[in-house]
C-alpha cells in the first residue's frame, strides 16, 4: 500500500523556481500493478523517485507500507532504464548482491539465486559479466536482482525503454507472468500507453509540466493477458482510444496541426 | 546481438572447422609478430655493432659486445646485484609509501566535495611542479642515503596515484550508488561493493603508470647524489668516460621497467576482466 498525500516538487534551476509536480494525492493498493503515463517532464519519474526516497518531496508526504518515506526506501525494488547492474559482478553475483548486503548465508543465497535465474530463464548465463549479455538479458538479470530480496514493491522507471519493439513485448510478457506469480505492488513509469494498458490494473495519466494527475483509469481486461495479441482486442482498442484522448493534448499533438 | 542468437550459439561445445581455421590463422599471426620483434632487436644490435668504431667513434656509442662484457663483469663481481638491490629497495619502498598515501588522500578528498574544492588550487600547483626539481630539497631533508631516494620515488608516485584515485572516486555512477542503497547497502558496504570496485580501474591505471615513475624517482635520486644503485653506476661510468658502463646501466633499467610493466598489465587484465570485451 502506497499513499501519496498532497505531494509537490519544485526545483530551483538557474535562479528560477520550476514546479515539477503540483499537489498530488494517490492511493496504490497492495498487490496492484499501476502505471504512470505522461509526456517527458510531467513529474512521473519524480513521483517514483520520491516513493523510492531518492529525492524528498517539497511538501506533502509519501507513505509506503504504513511508514512515511524519509530517506532511501529499502522496502522497494528499483529498476530504471539505465543499467544499474554492477559491471564488475557476474550475473549470479549481481543477483546475489542484495542478499549479500543483508548478510545472508552462502547456501541460502545460492539457492535463492538459482531460483531467481531459473525464473527469468538465465540459468545458463551465471558466470557472464553484464558486458557479455544482450540488452534484454541485462534487464532480466536486473529483474531477478530486485526480486531476489523479495521487496514489497517494485518501482520501475521505463525499464524497457531502451529495448527494441519485439524484445520489449517479450519483457512485458515476462513481467506480467512474474507479477501474476508474485503479486507484488508494481509502480511502472512509461510513456508508452499500450505498454501501460497491457500490464496494468490502473493507468494514471499525467499532464505536461507542471505535472498533475489528469486521469486515472481502471483496466478491466481479463488476466492472464497475451501482450503480443492484446493490441488487436477491441476492448483494448477502446481503452486505448479513451486514454489517448486524455494524453494527446499533453504531448503537444494539437500543436503540430497548422 | 539478440538473445536468441546468443542462446543458440552457446551450447556448441565442439569448435567447428571454421573456428579452428580462424584460431590457427590468429596463432600464426601472433608468432609472426613475435619473430618480427626479435628480428628488429637483432637488426638494431647488428647495426650498432657495425657502426661502432667504423661510422661513429666507439668512445660515444660503445658497442653491444662491450656492453655485454661490462654486464658480465658486473654480474661476476657482484656490482650489479648490489646496485640493483639498492635501486629496487628505494623504488619499492617509495612505491608503497607513495601509492598507499596517494590512495588514502585521493579517496578522502574524492568523497568530500568541499575538501576537493578547498584544496584544488594547491593540488594543481604541486601537480604542475616538476617533481625532479624537488630532489635537492629532499637531499637536504633526508641526506644522501636511501631515505632521499625513497622520498623522491614516493613523491612522484603519490601524485599519480592520488590524482587517479581522486578521479576514480568522483567517477562512481550515481545510478549504482542509488541502486545499492535501495537494495539496503550501508555506508561501509557502499564503499566495499560499489565505490572501491568502480574506482579500481582508475586506481590500477594510476598504479601501473607510477611503477616506471618510481624507478625514475629512485634513479634520479641516485644520479644526483649517491654512492650506490644503478643510477650511481651510470653516473660513475659517465664520470670515467666509460660509455659501455653507461649503456650497461641503461639496459638494466630498460629491462627492469619492461618486466614490471608486463607483470602489471597481466594483473590489470585479470582484475578488470569484467570490462567490455573487445
Image (cartoon, grey):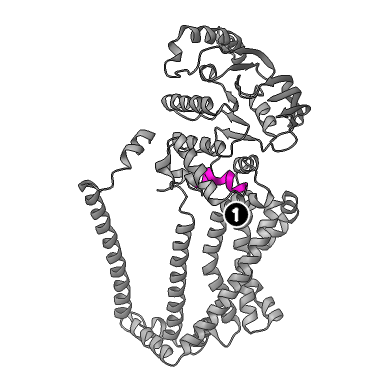
Residue extending farthest to the left is B17
Left or right: residue A182 versus residue A213 is left
In this picture, is B163 found above or below B249? above
In the rendered image, which quarter is residue B5 located in?
top left
Q: Main secondary structure of the magenta part?
A: helix
> In percent of the image, x 51 and y 48: which residue is there?
A89
> In percent of the image, x 57 and y 81: which residue is there?
B222
Residue extending farthest to the right is A59
Span highlighted in magenta in the image: A93-102
Q: Position of residue B137 (x, y in %)?
A: 69, 76
A98 or A245: nearer the viewer: A98
Identify the chain of the residue marked 1, using the numbered disc in the image: B
Quadrant holding the N terminus of chain A? top right
Label 1, secondary structure: give it. Answer: helix
In this picture, is A39 found above or below A63? above
In this picture, is B221 found above or below A231? below
Q: Is A83 colored magenta in this rendering?
A: no
Q: Can residue A135 be seen in the rendering of this structure?
A: no
| Residue located beneath label 1 in the image | B196
Q: Position of residue B21 (x, y in %)?
A: 21, 51
Q: Position of residue B59 (x, y in %)?
A: 40, 85
In this picture, is B66 found above or below B177? below
A152 or B179: nearer the viewer: A152
How packed is label 1: few (under 14 Cα within 10 Å), some, or many (20 or more)? some
Left or right: residue A91 versus residue B197 is left
B79 or A236: nearer the viewer: A236
Q: Position of residue B217 (x, y in %)?
A: 58, 73
How many marks the image carries: the answer is 1
Amino acid at each position: 500500500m502506497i499513499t501519496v498525500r498532497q505531494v509537490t516538487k519544485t526545483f530551483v534551476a538557474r535562479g528560477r523556481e520550476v514546479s515539477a509536480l503540483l499537489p498530488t494525492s494517490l492511493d496504490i493498493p497492495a498487490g496492484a500493478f499501476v502505471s504512470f503515463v505522461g509526456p517527458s517532464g510531467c513529474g512521473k519519474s519524480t513521483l517514483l523517485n520520491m516513493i523510492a526516497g531518492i529525492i524528498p518531496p517539497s511538501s506533502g508526504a509519501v507513505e509506503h507500507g504504513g511508514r512515511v518515506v524519509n530517506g532511501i526506501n529499502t522496502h522497494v525494488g528499483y529498476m530504471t532504464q539505465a543499467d544499474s547492474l554492477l559491471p564488475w559482478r557476474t550475473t549470479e553475483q549481481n543477483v546475489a548482491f542484495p542478499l549479500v548486503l543483508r548478510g545472508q548465508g552462502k547456501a541460502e543465497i545460492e539457492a535463492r539465486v538459482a531460483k531467481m535465474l531459473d525464473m527469468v530463464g538465465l540459468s545458463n548465463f551465471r558466470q557472464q559479466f553484464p558486458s557479455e549479455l544482450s540488452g534484454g538479458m541485462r534487464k532480466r538479470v536486473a529483474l531477478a536482482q530486485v526480486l531476489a530480496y523479495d521487496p514489497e514493491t517494485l518501482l520501475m522507471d521505463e525499464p524497457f525503454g531502451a529495448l527494441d519493439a519485439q524484445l520489449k513485448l517479450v519483457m512485458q510478457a515476462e513481467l506480467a507472468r512474474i507479477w501474476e506469480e508474485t503479486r507484488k505492488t508494481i509502480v511502472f513509469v512509461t510513456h508508452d500507453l499500450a505498454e501501460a494498458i497491457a500490464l496494468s490494473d490502473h493507468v494514471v495519466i499525467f499532464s505536461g509540466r507542471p505535472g498533475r494527475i489528469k486521469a486515472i483509469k481502471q483496466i478491466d481486461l481479463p488476466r492472464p493477458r497475451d501482450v503480443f495479441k492484446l493490441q488487436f482486442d477491441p476492448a483494448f482498442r477502446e481503452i486505448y482510444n479513451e486514454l489517448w484522448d486524455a494524453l494527446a493534448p499533453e504531448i503537444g499533438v494539437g500543436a503540430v496541426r497548422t | 546481438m539478440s538473445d536468441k542468437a546468443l542462446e543458440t550459439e552457446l551450447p556448441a561445445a565442439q569448435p567447428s572447422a571454421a573456428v579452428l581455421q580462424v584460431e590457427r590463422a590468429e596463432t600464426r599471426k601472433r608468432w609472426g609478430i613475435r619473430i618480427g620483434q626479435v628480428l628488429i632487436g637483432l637488426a638494431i644490435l647488428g647495426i650498432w655493432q657495425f657502426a661502432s668504431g667504423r661510422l661513429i667513434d666507439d668512445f660515444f656509442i660503445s658497442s653491444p659486445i662491450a656492453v655485454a662484457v661490462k654486464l658480465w663483469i658486473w654480474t661476476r663481481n657482484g656490482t650489479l646485484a648490489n646496485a640493483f638491490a639498492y635501486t629496487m629497495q628505494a623504488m619499492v619502498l617509495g612505491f608503497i609509501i607513495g601509492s598507499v598515501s596517494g590512495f588514502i588522500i585521493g579517496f578522502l578528498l574524492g568523497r568530500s566535495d568541499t575538501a576537493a574544492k578547498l584544496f584544488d588550487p594547491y593540488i594543481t600547483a604541486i601537480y604542475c611542479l616538476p617533481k625532479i626539481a624537488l630532489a635537492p630539497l629532499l637531499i637536504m631533508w633526508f641526506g644522501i642515503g636511501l631515505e632521499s631516494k625513497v622520498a623522491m620515488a614516493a613523491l612522484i608516485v603519490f601524485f599519480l596515484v592520488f590524482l587517479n584515485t581522486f578521479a576514480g572516486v568522483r567517477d562512481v555512477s550515481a545510478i549504482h550508488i542509488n541502486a545499492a542503497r535501495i537494495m539496503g547497502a550501508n555506508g561501509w558496504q557502499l564503499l566495499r561493493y560499489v565505490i572501491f570496485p568502480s574506482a579500481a580501474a582508475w586506481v590500477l591505471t594510476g598504479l601501473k603508470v607510477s611503477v616506471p615513475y618510481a624507478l625514475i624517482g629512485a634513479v634520479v635520486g641516485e644520479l644526483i647524489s649517491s654512492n650506490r644503485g644503478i643510477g650511481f653506476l651510470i653516473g660513475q661510468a659517465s664520470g670515467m668516460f666509460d660509455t659501455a658502463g653507461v649503456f650497461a646501466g641503461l639496459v638494466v633499467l630498460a629491462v627492469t621497467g619492461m618486466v614490471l610493466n608486463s607483470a602489471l598489465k597481466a594483473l590489470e587484465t585479470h582484475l578488470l576482466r569484467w570490462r567490455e570485451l573487445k
